Amino acid sequence: MTSSAKIVLAGVGKSFKAAGGGEIVAVSDASITIGAGEFVTIVGPSGCGKSTLLYIIGGFVSRSSGTITMDGRPIEGPGVERGIVFQEYALFPWLTVEQNILYPLRRRNLPKNEQKAEAARLIEVIGLRGFERRFPRELSGGMRQRVAIARTLAADPDVLLLDEPFGALDAQTREIMQDELLRVWRATSKTVCLITHDVTEAIYLSQRVLIMSARPGRIIDEVRISLDRDLPREECETSAAFAEQRNAVWLKVRREALAAATR
């Protein structure tokens, strides 16, 4: 883990008004410190408030209590320094695949030849060469999510916030996108916070996995991940170290999921 704190949550809570009156506490007293350049994943049972916590970091949802800062400054709303990929794809329907990816590149004021080259590279990475001029309505859900991921990467934010970004992808494409995310993180030292239900994905990508309790969600444990990321993926995922760390996280999440089911 790096020495300087990038994002700090202290005692963050979030409550929503219930339809029949009263309130629902989604997140309770969550305290997290994410170091600059660190890759952190949050896992937990369904409905525990993982996505809510991520949207609070992104500035899309206001907190009910506690404080949250980035680089020592309070987060009060969305910002270009924080790129987010939602569970549901979010594309401009009137723009083609290429135009959607070019949009953030133009906002970075890159030379046109660099914009086109980077857009082409990202389209190749997400496996959509030949679909450059297609509109979102002409793509499957998984293809649209791939474009949304590429567009977020094209914006080059300091912090990447990812809410189940690969859930709609087939297994092969999911692995390709995981590897690309890992490559980007290692090459750029971006700060990454990922939400996922996939414990194997969490272990493969992360330096640290935070485990949330059943609702109201609290950070109840963490597992530091130690893997040789210079190994080929096949060797990494079939190693004894990978299995041991995956099992440790899986058991903790399963206990919380079982607790949630009996409430």
Image: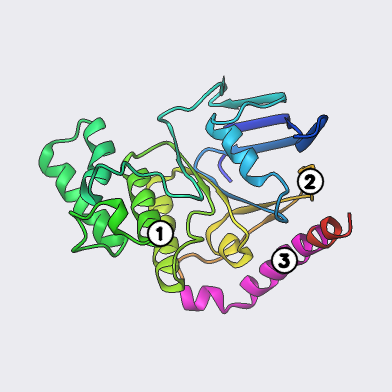
Q: Is residue 111 magenta?
A: no
Q: Identity of the amino acid at label 3?
A: Trp
- The mark that comes first in sequence, 3 or 2, is 2
Compared to 247, does 105 lie above or below?
Answer: above
**Label 2 residue SS:** loop
Q: Which residue is drawn at 83% across and 60% down?
A: 261
The answer to which image quadrant residue 142 occupies is bottom left
* Residue 251 lies within the magenta run: yes
* Residue 7 position (above or below residue 174): above
Mark 3 vs mark 1, foreground winner is 1
Question: Range of the magenta residues?
Answer: 232-256
Question: Which numbered disc covers residue 141?
Answer: 1
Q: Name the residue under label 3.
A: 250
Quarter-of-image position of residue 28:
top right
Q: Which amino acid does label 1 sit on?
A: Gly
Label number found at residue 215: 2
Instruction: Report if residue 207 is visible in the image.
Output: yes
